[in-house]
Amino acid sequence: MPMLRLMLLRHAKSSWTDPGRDDRDRPLSARGQKAAPAIGAFMRKEKLIPDLVLCSPARRARDTWKLVAETLKAAPKLIVDDAIYDFGNGGKLLDSLRHKGNGAKVVLLIGHNPSLERLALRLIGKGDAGLKERIAKKYPTGALAVLEFKAADWKAIKDAEGQLVSFTRPKDVLPKET
């Protein structure tokens, strides 16, 4: 049975310094600018290289991808999809994956909470219960969940059929500050 891998990356920490700025246009904070390359380096080390990136059009999500991609040293196909700029139950993200994932075996989806967290919890059926609990408790900015599915294509994946492989937060990979 073919294996599909879905990586769910919440955009890195964004800046709130300009309260008049439209939400879609908020840049990354200094913390986010450190976290994104650290997650990219982790992905490269663990060979978590996507074939396809589905990304929210929000600046903080696109900037997160740019920093991850530079560190990852990979150039997968990128689709910026308005449907991923969503804060619901994860359904729009799943629809985007099912309709745009065609042919990709490894997809990185870069989006927002709460929809990203809800999608992860909805899809996880197996895996480390402690990691699933950590996701349910808090899916921080810059965190990456990796799920695998025994399915031929993205249209075939269903709720509770994913295996949670890992959940990595920026604080797990950034050097400890003294």
Image: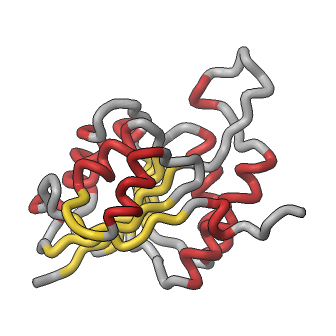
Q: Which quadrant does the N terminus fall into?
A: bottom left
- In the picture shown, does residue 84 fall above or below 65? above
Residue depicted at 57% across the width and 30% down the height: 24
Does residue 175 appear left or right of residue 12 in this picture?
right
Residue 104 visible somewhere in the drawing: no
> In this view of the protein, which residue sits in the foreground, 21 or 160?
160
Badge count: 0
Residue depicted at 46% across the width and 64% down the height: 167
- In the picture shown, does residue 87 fall above or below 32? above
Q: Tell me residue 66's x, y (percent).
A: 63, 59
Q: Which quadrant does the C terminus fall into?
A: bottom right
Q: Tell me residue 88's x, y (percent).
A: 33, 31
Q: Going by the picture, which residue comes out furthest to the top?
A: 20
Residue depicted at 41% across the width and 36% down the height: 114
- In the picture shown, does residue 105 fall above or below 125? below
Specify the color scheme: secondary structure
Residue depicted at 25% across the width and 59% down the height: 124
Does residue 118 appear left or right of residue 60 in this picture?
left
Does residue 120 appear left or right of residue 76 in this picture?
left
Q: Tell me residue 2's x, y (percent).
A: 16, 82
Does residue 86 appear left or right of residue 33 in this picture?
left
Q: Which corner quadrant of the image does residue 54 belong to? A: bottom left
